[in-house]
Image: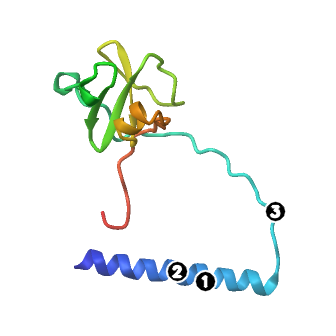
Amino acid sequence: MEKITLLLASAFIMNSVSIANAQVANESQLLLPAVPVAAVPLKETYVTFPATSNNNIEYYAGTETYPYVYYSGYFWYPKAEANILTEYTPTYWNGYYWYASRIHPHQVYLEKQNALYLVPMEPTGILE
């Protein structure tokens, strides 16, 4: 119950702050130029590919050309290249480098959507 109360209170505060900022901006009409934000370098990776002895490669639709491993909330896909993500070293196992994605194998293999590989991070937020 405390988490729900905390979530509601923070949502209310965030909403009221954004409304107040919008009102100030509308009253003063002071517009600042958009400044590009520099990319923040990756410092840590929290979630990694599981130990190779525990991996069970699954094949979507039973087809060996559609391999993936589901672990820690990510779909892990094999690639031949080790440099797809900068500042991230993928796990080399079974002849491939394994990368994490949130995209389901159906979307990747059948709908041919880009897997959007990402650095697996430990989720953090107000409820934790």
Query: Helix or strand or loop: what does disc 1 sit on?
Result: helix
3D distance between C-alphas at marks 3 and 2: 24 Å
Q: Which residue corresponds to mark 1? A: 19
3D distance between C-alphas at marks 2 and 1: 6 Å
Circles 3 and 2: CB distance less than 8 Å?
A: no
Q: Position of residue 14 (x, y in %)?
A: 51, 77
Q: Quadrant of the C terminus?
A: bottom left
Q: Position of residue 109 (x, y in %)?
A: 40, 30
Q: Earlier in the sequence, mark 3 or mark 2?
A: 2
Circles 3 and 1: CB distance less than 8 Å?
A: no
The residue located at (59%, 78%) in the rendering is 18
Query: Helix or strand or loop: what does disc 2 sit on?
Result: helix
The quarter of the displayed image where residue 125 is located: bottom left
The amino acid type found where label 1 is placed reads: Ile
Question: Which residue is at the front of the view, 70 or 28?
Answer: 70
On screen, residue 81 above or below 24: above
The amino acid type found where label 3 is placed reads: Pro
Q: Which residue is most to the top?
A: 95
Q: Which mark is residue 34?
A: none
Query: Helix or strand or loop: what does disc 3 sit on?
Result: loop
Crowding at mark 3 (Cα within 10 Å: few <14, some 14-19, many 20+): few
Q: Which residue corresponds to mark 3? A: 33
Q: Which residue corresponds to mark 2? A: 15
The residue located at (67%, 47%) in the rendering is 38
Q: Which residue is most to the left?
A: 54
Q: How is the structure coloured here?
A: rainbow
Question: Which residue is at the front of the view, 116 or 60?
Answer: 60
Q: Position of residue 100 (x, y in %)?
A: 38, 35
Question: Which residue is at the front of the view, 46 or 73?
Answer: 73
